[in-house]
Every structure is written in C-alpha cells, then in structure tokens.
Amino acid sequence: MSFERLNLRFLIDEQLPPGLADRLIEAGHFAEHVRSVGLGGASDIAISEHAERIGAVLITKDEDFAEAGRSGRIAVVWVRFGNVTNRALWRSLQPVLPEIVAAIEDGETLIEVT
C-alpha cells in the first residue's frame, strides 16, 4: 500500500518571487502569488484573511505573519534566510518541502525554514 503526500494550497507573499508558485505547482501543489489574486500591496490582515478563506498555507518572509501561524488561524511557512536569488530560494526550499508538508499534515501551523 502506498502513501500519498497531501497536495497543499500555497499562497506566496509579496516579498517572495511569483516564480515560487510555478515551482510549487511543478512539485504537485496548487500555488498562487498574492499579486496574481489582486492582493499586491494589500495589508497583512487582508492577506491572512484571504489565506484563511481559501485554506491556503502562506509562505512569507514577513515576521508579522508568524503570530497568525502561532494563533492557528492559518498555517504559515516562515522563510527566515536573507535575500537570495530565485534559484537559490528554490534550492533551499525544495529539499525541505516534504518536511513542510509533513509538518502541516501533523497540524503544525508555524513552520520556520532557516
């Protein structure tokens, strides 16, 4: 019997590149960038509410969203490393993506990636 990992829905925050959504889609998940859903420049509250409404995991570099993750309102993947190229960002995230998915499956709502 094989076990399939959960396909998640991700919302990519504004400080991260829109191309990250493409990489996550290629990895078998649904993903969209805040700009593609009309939330470019939106407040943190509006972004949090949208993520909650659509059941998305928010991927962000913004520490302010960590509290939303701690509260359990939404699941947050908090990217904690400095500015990197798009390629380097994916090289850092891709190997830990299965761990991120497993943590979310286990009910964790704040996953820090360093």
Image: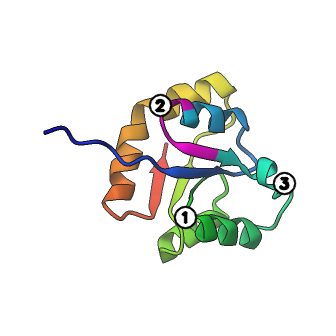
Q: Amino acid at mark 1?
A: Gly
Cα–Cα gap, marks 3 and 1: 19 Å
Compared to residue 22, the image places residue 58 above or below, namely below
Q: 17 or 24: nearer the eye?
A: 24
Q: Amino acid at mark 3?
A: Gly
Which residue in the structure is indicated by mark 2?
A: 94
Cα–Cα gap, marks 2 and 3: 25 Å
Indicate the quadrant where residue 66 lies: bottom right
Which residue in the structure is indicated by mark 3?
A: 40
Which residue sits at x=33%, y=44%?
5
Which residue sits at x=73%, y=38%?
18
Residue lying furthest right = 41
Which residue in the structure is indicated by mark 1?
A: 55
Q: Which quadrant does the N terminus fall into?
A: top left
Is residue 60 visible to the viewer in this orientation of the structure? no
- Position of 45 compared to 4: left or right? right
Which residue sits at x=84%, y=54%?
40
Compared to residue 108, the image places residue 18 above or below, namely above
- Of marks 1 and 2, which one's residue comes earlier in the chain? 1
Residue 29 sits inside the magenta stretch: yes
Start and end of the magenta stretch? 26-31
Cα–Cα gap, marks 1 and 2: 22 Å
- Of marks 3 and 1, which one's residue comes earlier in the chain? 3
Percent position of residue 87, x then y: 63, 22
Indicate the quadrant where residue 58 lies: bottom right
Which residue sits at x=72%, y=65%?
47
